[in-house]
Image (tube, rainbow, N blue to C red):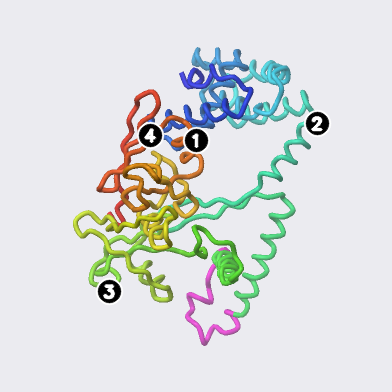
Amino acid sequence: VLADVVDDIPDRSAADDAEREWRSDLVAASLSWSPRSTAHRLVTARRLVRELPLTHGLLGAGEISFRHAWVLADEVGDLSSEDIAAVEARVIERAPAQTVAQFARSVRRAIIAVNPDLAAARRAKAVRLRGVRRVAYADGMAGVIATMEAADAETVYQALDATARKAAAEAKAATEAKAATEAELPIDARRSDALLAWADDALANPDLPRRQGRRVELQVVIDLPSLLGMAENPAELIGYGPIPAAAARALAGEAGWRRLVTDPADGHLLDYGTSIYRPPRRLVDYLVARDRRCRFPGCERQADACDIDHVCPAGKPGGKTAACNCCCLCRRHHRMKTHGGWSLELHDDGSVTWSSPSGYVFNVDPVGQLE
């Protein structure tokens, strides 16, 4: 079924790519999936149906799991149709008797045998796609995962390790003057502290690029009673999610403050208006704080990396530059609204209604600053 969504779109032009993106977003909104994972699922489904008939047949017969099929479809993504068929022929007979991990190793061996030049090409591509991403964990914790060449990763690790061990040695030498718990911090914790110290130094650089016209900043939202220690309501670390009030108070002690006035009944930010086209600084700040992320269903792009979009275009009746007519959209969904036939309605309570060209309707709830 997923393959049918994009199977009739040719692979000829940028317009075809845009149509495929917009159909993918329709599926994402319908099934409450993220746009990124939906796009990947559609590509995998299309490849499985179009180019891996033996695998598709075994999956339909229940002889292999979906994970087996997914691994093969994912691994052969950059091969020609002829090479895909050759890899499938090499691995499919043993697949029903293999675990997913065993099957994955078989697939990679087969790819090297069928196209020995691919390993070098894949490595070059992987180097171009290296990057860093954030992952949210429980208990107010998160991860920063950096993907890079093996030698570079070892360089970073060795630098963090050396810095951590230096800090541990200094703490041990000053044990009598420090709390025992600080002197006995695990070395892994000290590596984490070394990375944070580098980030703090980097953000102090006044020449860093800006987002939405502002320097990069950490944002925490907390209600006044919890800030004063009179309550323990959850706070919000923008980009992560809820954190304990005690953690927010610790961050607030050394922070610059910005007052946001919210509706006491529902926690939504209050509005103000303006009649000019380019959103002024105060309006941009307000919209970024109000929306948090792109307002398309399931999109996780943070608001400070989004466009400020006029729901009703400027120059038309109702097209004023005000919070009641502006919202944050990532470039992809801004383009989809402008050129893809989708329409957007922004309601007084901050909720959003999207309508697809085929008539499907999706409602996005307003963003409460604190639940």
Label 3 neighbourhood size at 10 Å, few (<14), some (14-19), many (20+)?
Answer: few
For disc 3, the marked residue is 228
Q: Quadrant of residue 225?
A: bottom left
Question: Is there CB contact under 8 Å for labels 3 and 4?
Answer: no
- Residue range in magenta is 171-188
**N-terminal label among 3 and 4:** 3
Amino acid residing under circle 4: Ser
* Separation of marks 3 and 4 at Cα, in angstroms: 43 Å
- As helix, strand or loop, the secondary structure at mark 1 comes to helix
Residue 177 part of the magenta segment: yes
**N-terminal label among 4 and 1:** 1
Q: Which mark is residue 37?
A: 1
- As helix, strand or loop, the secondary structure at mark 4 comes to strand
Question: Is there CB contact under 8 Å for labels 2 and 3?
Answer: no
For disc 4, the marked residue is 343
x%, y% of residue 198?
60, 68
